[in-house]
Amino acid sequence: MIPPRPGAPIVLALGLLCSLAACSKGPEQRSVILITIDTLRADHLSGAGYGRRTSTHLDRLAQEGTSFDWALSPTSYTRPSHASMLTGLDPSFHSVGLLNYELALRPEERTLPEICGAAGLSTAAVVSNFILQKGSGLEQGFATYDDRLPDLEQVRRLPERSAKHAVDSALALLPSLEQGRFFLWLHLQDPHGPYTPAAHIAEPEPVGAAPERLERALPLGTDQSGYRSIPAYQGVGTERAFEQYRARYDREIKATDQELGRFLDALRAKGLLDTTLVIVTADHGEALGEDDYFFSHCHSVGLDQVHVPLIVAGPGVREGARIAAPVGNLDVFATALEFLDLPAPAGTHSRSLLPVLRGAAPVPEGPVFTASISQRGIALGGQYLRTDRFPAMDTEFWRVNPLNQSTFVPLGTNAWSLAGRQAVPIEPQPELLTRLQQFGAEADAALKALTSGLDTRAIDEGARRSLRALGYAK
C-alpha cells in the first residue's frame, strides 16, 4: 500500500468521505466490467516494476484503484481459465475441466452473466479468441455475445480479433448498456502469439532497471511447444534472436494498453467509473525461457504461466493500494456478485475481495490452487509450490503433450517465496506439498465424476487422446 505523504490526514479524510459516498450508491446503480487480456504476464507491466514502459494506461488504472502483487490464474490456458472466472470453480470442478478446446461448459453450470441477467442486468460480451466463440459454453447467460473474428493471425492464419476492433465493438455496445445496470466482459487477444504488433508500435522505452538481456539465438521448432525453440506458429520471418521476440511481446502489450486506454477514457468521460467496478486480469501468462520453454504456455503452472495482473477500480475501491497476499483471479466471480449485492451459489471456490478493496478486511486466509494437465500448484503463507501430477517414469504420459501433441516434459517440484515483488526460489515445503496432494485427490475425484458420463464418441480423436492421458476415457 502507498504510504501517506506528510500532512496527509486531511487528504485521507477527504478520500474516506469520497469513498463512503461512492459506497452509498445503491446496488440498483452498480455495474461491472470484466476485462481479460490473453497471455499477459504480470511482471511485464511497468506498474509492476518491469523495466520498460509497457502499460501506461493500466498503471493509471492501478493508481485509481487497487492492484494485487500475486494474483494467480487457475490454469495456464484460455478456456478453462475463463470458465473458472465465470463460474467461481476450480477447473477440475467445472465441465470444461483441464482441457483447452475439446469440452464445453455445460448448461447446468451457473455462470456470472446468468446470475446478473436473472437479476435484471443487461449482459454482453466481446471476445477475440476462437476458443471462446459460441459453442464453448461461455456464451450462456449473455444477452449479447459478440464473437465475430474479422482478423487473421499472421502466421497460422487462424481467425481472431485485434484489440482495436474489440474495443470498437465494446464502445458500440456502451450506449445501450449504460441505460441501466449491466455486466460487460471484454476479452483482448493481442499479447497471444504470434507476436505481430503494428509497425507504428515502437519498442517500449526503458524505465528504471532495464530487463537483463539474453543474447541467445533459438532454432525454429518443429512443434508448438516452445521447448528449447521458437514454437512453429511463432516464427516471424528469419528472426531467431530471443530479444527480438521479447521486444515483440512487449510491443503487443503496449499496443493492447493503448487500446485499453481508449476504452477507459470513454468510461471516464461517461462517468461510468462512478458506478462501475472495472476488473482487469489475464487468463494466463507466457514462458520467456523459464524451464527451457520459450514464447508458449500450457506446459506447466510455473509462475511465468499463472502469475497474472489483477487491477480493480471503481466506487469504494481504495486508490493506489497494493495487496501483497496471494489471491486467485477466479475470485472476481464472488467479488463482482457482492458488489452487485447478488448472492453467490453455494459450493464455489471463489472468495469475495470486496472488503479487501474497500480496506475493511485483509485477504481471506486459505490456499490458492492452480492446475494444468501436467502440474498442480498451491500458494499459501507467502509461498508458492508446484509439482508434477504424474511421476517422471510415467513414460506414456510424458511422451507427448496431450493438449497439442508436442514436447511435454516433467519439471519436478519447485517452490518460491512471494514475500516481495520478485519471487525467490526456496526449498519445497513438505506441509504445502501435503496440502496440495490432499486437494489433488479431491480434484481428481471431481474431474473423474464430471467426465465419467461423457460420450467420447461425440468428440474428436484429439479430445479422446487428452482424456486418455488423464485416465478418464478409453
Image (tube, rainbow, N blue to C red):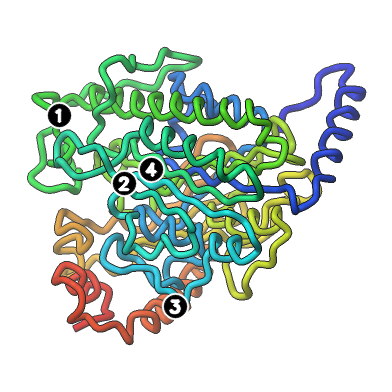
At x 60%, y 60%, the residue is: 116
Tell me which amino acid carries mark 1: Val
- Residue situated in front as seen by the camera: 192 or 421: 192
At x 48%, y 58%, the residue is: 142
- Residue situated in front as seen by the camera: 207 or 94: 94
At x 37%, y 42%, the residue is: 39
* Residue where numbered disc 1 is placed: 236
* Residue 368, horizontal then vertical, whole percent: 55, 59
Tell me which amino acid carries mark 2: Arg
**Cα–Cα gap, marks 3 and 2:** 40 Å
* Residue where numbered disc 2 is placed: 148
Which of pointers 3 and 1 indicates the residue nearer the eye?
Answer: 1
Secondary structure of the residue carrying numbered label 1: loop
* Residue 85, horizontal then vertical, whole percent: 50, 57
**Cα–Cα gap, marks 3 and 1:** 43 Å
* Residue where numbered disc 4 is placed: 38
